[in-house]
Amino acid sequence: MTNMMKVRPHPTQNEALLFEKSSPGKRAYKLPPLDVPVVDPAELLQGQCRVQQAELPELSEIELIRHFTRLSTWNYAIDLGMYPLGSCTMKYNPRVNEFVARVEGLAEAHPYRPDTHAQGVLEVIDLLQHCLVEITGMDAITLQPAAGAHGEFTGILLVRAWHESQGNPRKKILIPDSAHGTNPATAALSGYTVENIKSNSEGGIDLDVLASRVDEDTAALMLTNPSTLGVFEGEIHKIADILHAKGALLYMDGANMNALVGKVRPGDFGVDVMHLNLHKTFSTPHGGGGPGSGPVACKAFLEPFLPAPVLVRKAGNREQGTGNRKDGTAGLRDLGTGGELHWDYDRPQSIGRVRAFYGNTGVMIRALAYILANGPDGLRQTTEDAVLNANYIRRKLEDLYELPYKTASMHEVVFSDKRQAARGVKTGDIAKRLIDYGFHPYTVSFPLIVHGALMIEPTESESREELDLFIDAMRAIAQEVEEKPELVKTAPHSTRISRLDEVQAARKPILRWRKTGNGE
Amino acid sequence: MRYLPKSDEERRAMLAEIGAASIDDLFASIPAEYRLDRDLNVPRQQAESEIIQYFRAAGDKNSTGYASFLGAGAYRHYRPVIIDSLVQRGEFLTSYTPYQAEITQGTLQAIFEFQTMIAELTGMDVANASMYDGSTGAAEAVMMAARVTGRHKAVVAATVHPEYREVLATYTRHQGLPAAIVGYNARTGRIDLEALAAAVSEETAAVLVQSPNFFGVVEDIPAIADVAHKKGALLIVTIAEAVSLGIVRPPVEADIVAMEAQSFGVALSYGGPFCGVIATKEQFVRQMPGRLVGQTVDGAGNRGFVLTLATREQHIRREKATSNICTNQALVALMATIFMSVYGKQGMKELAEHNLAKADYAAKTLGSAPGAKLRFSGAPRFHEFVLETDEEPAAWSQRLLENKIVGGVELSRWYPELKNCTLWCATEVITREQIDTAARVLTAAPVEA
């Protein structure tokens, strides 16, 4: 394995479950002495007192540190190397983001403190709203949704509320067959039926098909642009026109916004409403699955329907929705100089709340720190580098891996396992083999319109050296597929555990540890 | 730009290898009329020191150093230092959802431990990891109950957090799943059991109650479960204050528990990110939304963990999924896991007892101040209580703020009948001195000249 430049094996330590390591009497905490009278819980709680303690582990602090540190060493992470999961935008998560999210006055702010005593965090939210409205080219925004799918739900409810205000909520949402699973799930959650639109030979929307499917029952088209193939819908304006002519709206899934920031704005090409993923495009950490944040930006006609409350600024006698502000780069100087900010709950046309409080504020803080670190020039350069990296990979691998759609790639490239499958090796096998070479796999078998898809999104965070190592690994694997396919089919060979029995896991689920000897 | 690992020379070389004359070639598929030919109107690129300065200034502009009696679904508890040390390890922080089990066993085992501890605390069989927050968890639990029962009506206690109820209304409005609200007993603050019995029918999918409820009062869960189960409805108990489980009887009669785990070591952070969880009985697990980790073995028989029962989820089932949730609150769940491990079996009880004691002292002290009285005083409480004052809250809360104290939250914004009533919370971080000061300032109404 001469070409495994990136890795060399090293032992990781075994670590049992917390419960298996526990022994009675050990502890990792110390409470200060109680400065008020001791109470009798049984008396105060009048029979609602807990009798049997929960079986939580009993361990000392050093054991906990080692436990979780050892577990952490079993994870792959962006901090260790390239994480080319298509559609997930696994970019560098700057550490200053973590630092500022923990600034005391922000991290310890209670959501119900009076607005007058929360002006600092409201300024942060206001500035982020301004930046995101500018980046998307939309008119207004809500930061309440907690993740992308939550944003989709919010956005489709805005669509629905608007149609209802026109007298008819309409019945269906059109969704391309290349869309993320969240799109149809969202449409169903919003009370719409889903109608799938087959992609054309270039992987994009077929305008004739679209025109034939859009009617007075169509509420919206949910479109990912660039698509999950990493392809920009070149006729996007025509798509918008077809929808608008029938009174339907254009919803954009902003999952792939990392290909667009600073180069083109959805609001300028006909999008009515869209969501962003702050945990993708704006560098907040994925944290093993979350938290995220899924702001929804919309055109002015949808603004009255935004979830309540909405942030407004008192400026003299008039109040102004802050999302509408287009007053320039004064952002940082605003602190302490603008009118007072406060939450407006009086929103009679609002779709209602989608979450308690105001959203994942801690994630918003990190996203704003990222925008400030970049500025307009950095944001544009970031987009350009992301697209450059994807095209570099495409160029260096297209001779060995089948490119099902030859359309120009933006921030990600999608290959098919067609050639390798002829040798009995599937995309999932190639993905597992990449692990042995020191990389996280790409996104496997998605989008569904590509047979055996390899969906690769390098992001801007990869140096040329790291890209070349990845390319070398992919080329070496292609060769292995020809020469020793079994090696690939049984990968990974270097990990703590080999492929796990997922069938058994699902058939007889063990979803928790139980104390042995208690009859379970 | 300091996050971008390329020199201009490298960019040029890469473009040449691609065969592009300039970077613009790679954006040629975007119609020219839509391309942005100007800088975005956002603040200029800032140095790291400037960024820190900006956020510190914002933090200072939020009033800091106040004693706070605010609770109402977001609770201030001490956060052990090792939580942040551990969750900031890049291997946890910068990892994705653990679909590739061979290289994400760390996250997977920690989630399995989380699921176990939540199940232990709630008295349920299984728990997911995770939902966005307590409010969306409660809404998803109601929809889950509708799938389990095949019924399409909900009965909801008025003492469920008002914002949870608002979220529920948003979620269920287009599901054909109306919710009837059941009031509370004016003396005890508990759900009105007679009204509940009248509201529940053979068409009821779920009864949703909160305990401790929004007024801090512990509900009689066995009695409520009887009413629900008699008509074949499921009982969903939502828990906004997870620390209560250290001392309050777990809702074992419930079919689903939808809780908010923010109290387990998660910063208030102006309302998020928090951590919702749904726990339930084993027989309902296939109707549960959200991710689940299961134990299994690899080819050599080694124990390992995987995401499982994915056929419930949107990436497999699309419009037929149990939920559209994808990104969740995994890192926050890890914080909670570490918090539960730090306190452990004994500590969780001791911590809850401290909360109980502080709140009891605060309720008695503030409730016996002239011009103030305790509402719902006969019912069992955890660490929140409702105070009714002769004076309008707007007046005394201003006085408290001048003394660097944030008093209770005014209830009339959600419960018009509770005029001059405020909801107070005292956790272990409140001191006796702060409680005494608050009581003194509260009653020190300025004397009219």
Image (spheres, coloured by chain):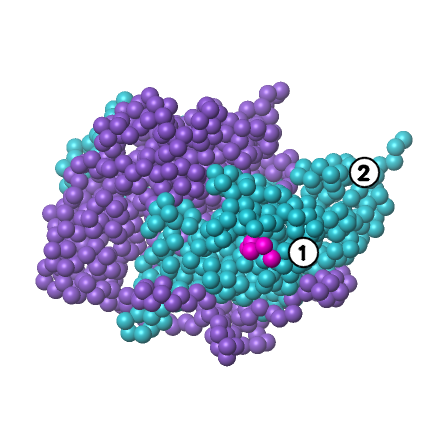
Chain colours: A purple, B cyan
- Looking at the image, residue A210 sits to the left or right of residue B81; the answer is left
Establish if A94 lies above or below B247.
above
What percent of the width, then of the height, locates residue A137? 39, 27
Crowding near the residue tagged with mark 1, few <14, some 14–19, many ≥20 C-alpha atoms within 10 Å = many
At a point 59% along the width and 62% down the height, the residue shown is: B253
* Element at label 2: loop
What percent of the width, then of the height, locates residue A88? 33, 47
Q: Quadrant of residue B36?
A: top left
Q: Residue furthest left?
A: A483
Q: Quadrant of residue A147?
A: top left
- Looking at the image, residue B11 sits to the left or right of residue B260; the answer is left
Q: Which residues are magenta?
A: B230-234
Crowding near the residue tagged with mark 2, few <14, some 14–19, many ≥20 C-alpha atoms within 10 Å = some
Q: CA distance from mark 2 to mark 1?
A: 30 Å
Q: Which mark is residue B219?
A: 1
Q: Which mark is residue A229?
A: none
At a point 44% along the width and 55% down the height, the residue shown is: B287
Residue B327 in view here = no
Establish if A48 lies above or below B300.
above
Q: Is residue B232 magenta?
A: yes
What percent of the width, then of the height, locates residue A170? 41, 30
Of label 2 and label 1, which has the lower sequence position? 1
Q: Residue furthest bottom?
A: A517
Dot 2 corresponds to which residue?
Answer: B391
Residue at mark 2: chain: B
Q: Is residue A103 magenta?
A: no
**Quadrant where the N terminus of chain A lies?**
bottom left
At a point 56% along the width and 47% down the height, the residue shown is: B154
